[in-house]
Image: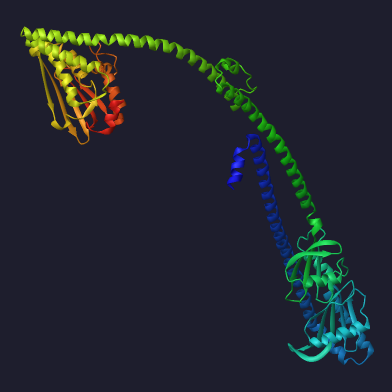
Amino acid sequence: MSKIKNAFTTLPIHHKTILLIGLLMLISFTFYASVLRYVFSIYDRQIYEKSSQVLNMSSVGIENQLREVSNLSFKVMSDEPLQQYLLQLEKAETGYERNGLRKKITNRLVAYAGSEKYVYSMLFIDNDNNVMAAGNREGISESKQKELVSLGDQYTGSNVWHTSGDKQARLLSVRQVKSFTGGAFTLDKLGTLIIRVRLDRIVQDQMQEPAEDSQLLISDGKEVIYPTESSVSEAEIESELKRTQPYGIAMFEQGRHFVARANSSYTDWTYLYITPFDQMFKKIQFVKQLVTVIFIMIFLAALIIGAKFSRSITHPIAQLIKKMRNIEKGDLDKLEEAALGNVPMSPQNEVGLLHRTFKMMLQRIRELIDENYAKQLVIRETELKALQAQINPHFLYNTLESINWMAKVQKQRQISEMVEALGFLLRSSVNMTEKWITLERELDIVRSYVTIQRTRFEERLDFDMEIAPEVGSARIPKLTLQPLVENAIHYALEPSIDPCRIRIRARAEEDQVIIEVEDDGPGMTPEFLEQLHEGRIQTRGQGIGLSNIQERIRLTFGEEGRMVMSSKPGSGTVVSISIPWIREDDDDVQSDARR
């Protein structure tokens, strides 16, 4: 399996596309064939259910009509006037009297037979074998009469069906007529009643929605009762009667037929519903063949279209790869030639955009090469100037040391302190290798700055600090507090001639360090505070603005660091900074400091 996977992975996109299209079409055809087979099986079942429904409804209707004929036979047998005529006929002595009674009996039979749709004729055979008929005048042979009389005698008054009639009335209802006096039957035989039934009409009327060219066969197990003439031979019918399944496909002389079977509990007959299978599925077979041909055509068309489509993608990509390999060899002199190559006709599709992007990339490479060459020249010049500029800070530090030494010689302590503070402040500001320092070191920078400012403002500057001992080792970004103190002096102390108190407080709250710079100056209006917060008003000289401090806190600590500034006119100003408590020995801080 892994070999097949590896082989497929290494195939070109063109071959992969054709292979996948072919595989998908084969899977679709397999699915189609499976579904079609399943649908045909469902269709066979539906045909059986439909045939069985038609057969059951038809057989029930036929048997109901046969019961009606049986009831008619009983009704005729128990007819009181007919009983009186038959009893008088038994006692008549003269031929004239007997003829008159036979005529009355015939008229009575006509009255019953004339109103019955499915009665072909009605006959009565008396004990002297005289026949009285109503309906169709076609008679029954004497031998058949004797057979029917004997059959009626066997069933002694019960209705019995005889299926060996003629073509017009194959089905006969036979019943022995006994005397009926006082509401009870006696054992006296009065004759035999025979009803010739139009079974063909019953079947035609009771067939429920017969399918085209389908036919109903009724057999008593020995011979076919209906129809009198059938295209199916007796041997074929006998073979179907032996089938155990209730339905199936039979091979007759006329072709394949779908046969459904039902057995009657009333007459012990077998009903066969036969439908030509080939003709029934002729259209379905045509559709099946048509769909197969269409599928093959679609399969071939899909392969051709897929091959062309795949070629339209892979050919431009192959051209692009060829250009890339030329550049890969390091021949940068051909950059312009590769960039000015042909671009596909449809630049808006993915392949066209790929070519355009490659062209823009080559142009950008040329620009970067030229730009890099120019930058190298600038870098060399900058390095030279940087080496030269390193002399200036050392010269400044040496000069400050000389001033400090002279101030000490002259015993000018104030000048000496200010020069030392200025030197420390300059060293701390110029040294940008450290991004993080402890809070204690940041406060040293603030003290140096305040020392210089006290020389200027003397007693007007009242500065003190309230620092919790445990937060001295907390890490903060360098030059965070000094700009805040500088702003307090600039906006709170300078505008007034009164003393101004500036206080720094630092404490710990859970995992946070809270640092506040507070002054009791004149305060600020909300409009001025908003401008200062947005950085539109900078600190004095080249100082660091509040927006700069706030942005550095946000970039360093994210959502955990924040700076809030509150002030009201006449109430002073408070700047509060809240940052995570990061200790001096934390690894991540030290790694950030090294970076």
The residue under the point 20% across, 19% down is: 484
Q: Is residue 196 above or below residue 126?
A: above
Asked whether residue 498 is in view, the answer is no
Q: Quadrant of residue 223?
A: bottom right
Q: Nearest the camera: 593 or 57?
A: 593
Residue 373 located left or right of residue 289: left
Q: Nearest the camera: 517 or 181?
A: 517
Q: Is residue 424 above or below residue 471?
A: above
Residue 495 located left or right of residue 7: left
The residue under the point 84% across, 82% down is: 193
Asked whether residue 110 is in view, the answer is yes
**Residue 566 percent location from the top left of the image:** 21, 23
**Residue 342 percent location from the top left of the image:** 64, 19
Q: Is residue 177 above or below residue 493?
A: below
Q: Quadrant of residue 186?
A: bottom right
- Colour option used: rainbow
Quadrant that contains the C terminus? top left
